[in-house]
Image (cartoon, helix red, strand yellow):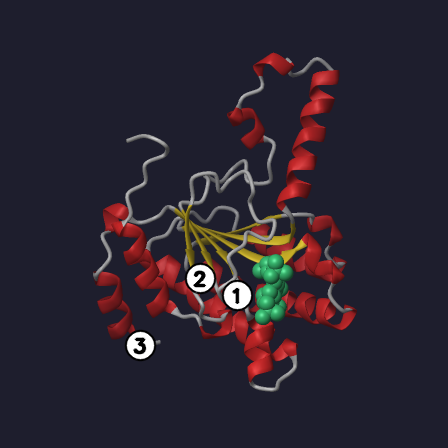
Amino acid sequence: MNSNTSSSAYKDLDPAKLPSHVAIIMDGNGRWAKKRLLNRIKGHERGSETVRAIVRACRKIGISYLTLYAFSTENWQRPRSEVTALMTLLKKFLESEQKEMLDNNIRLYAIGQIERLPKNVRQVLYKAMTLTKKNNGMILNLALSYGGRAEIVKMVKEIAIKAKDDIIDPDSITPEIISEHLYTSEIPDPDLLIRTSGEMRISNFLLWQIAYTEIYVTDTLWPDFGKDEFVRILQDYQQRERRYGKV
Ligand code: IPE
Ligand code: IPE
Ligand code: MG
């Protein structure tokens, strides 16, 4: 990696105004491949290279939490061959990045219906999560078989059962109690949400958590995305005034 260019790009960022939590909808792998008359899988392969680059950049810049939307509950409806290829890539990524995460004090975390992932993927995922459990430099949070609505259904069921069993009084339910029953209970809400490849939609990502998140949509396809554009987006974020409904 060229450390000169990276340090000069990062220098333009105000360390006091960095987002603590960046979430990314990594979209456009299929279109990237289609433009090149390649199989969609090639796009996912290139996309996983971008993941490596952005994880590194976030760690260097000093982002505390990075959440990546890697696979949605709806993505199970893609052709079986594509789902299998994505799961294989995920397993490869987890295996190859384990050392990098340990060397760079990165803790791996995952949100979503992890039980739906193939057993061999779950095994490497749990191994990497356990090995990096004590790391506190950055949390890399992967959204896997994640859906915001499924997460809300899970939260409502858990709270309803506690109400039925007299553990929770319905009158005392607060936004904080709801947050505690989501997958992200240990993670603050995102400050910045980036979506690549131009689509102006949320696609069932972190529905509750993005209530006051700043949104940035870039036309760049995920495999073409890189740290220079990421730094420009962070600079744009640093210019924004977050009002939270106040004046
Ligand atoms: C994002 O790229 C990766 C996943 C959703 C797993 P896509 O595969 O959605 O790419 P496009 O949207 O078809 O270009
Ligand atoms: C969102 O992208 C899901 C992930 C990036 C994992 P999709 O490509 O699945 O979303 P839609 O279909 O454009 O809404
Ligand atoms: Mg897509």
Residue 27 % position (x, y):
54, 65
Disc 2 secondary structure class: helix
- 131 in relation to 183, above or below: below
Is residue 110 left or right of 14 when viewed as pictured?
right
- Residue on which disc 1 sits: 97
Residue 225 sits in quarter: bottom left
Q: Residue at x 52, y 65 (%)?
A: 97
Dot label at residue 55: 2
Verify CB contact (< 8 Å) between mark 2 and mark 1: yes
Residue type at tag 1: Glu
Ligand 3, image quadrant it occupies = bottom right
Verify CB contact (< 8 Å) between mark 1 and mark 3: no
Residue 138 % position (x, y):
42, 51
- 142 in relation to 173, above or below: below
Quadrant of the image for the N terminus? Answer: bottom left
Residue type at tag 3: Asn
For the residue pair 98 and 152, the one nearer the viewer reads as: 152
**CA separation in Å, label 1 and label 3:** 20 Å
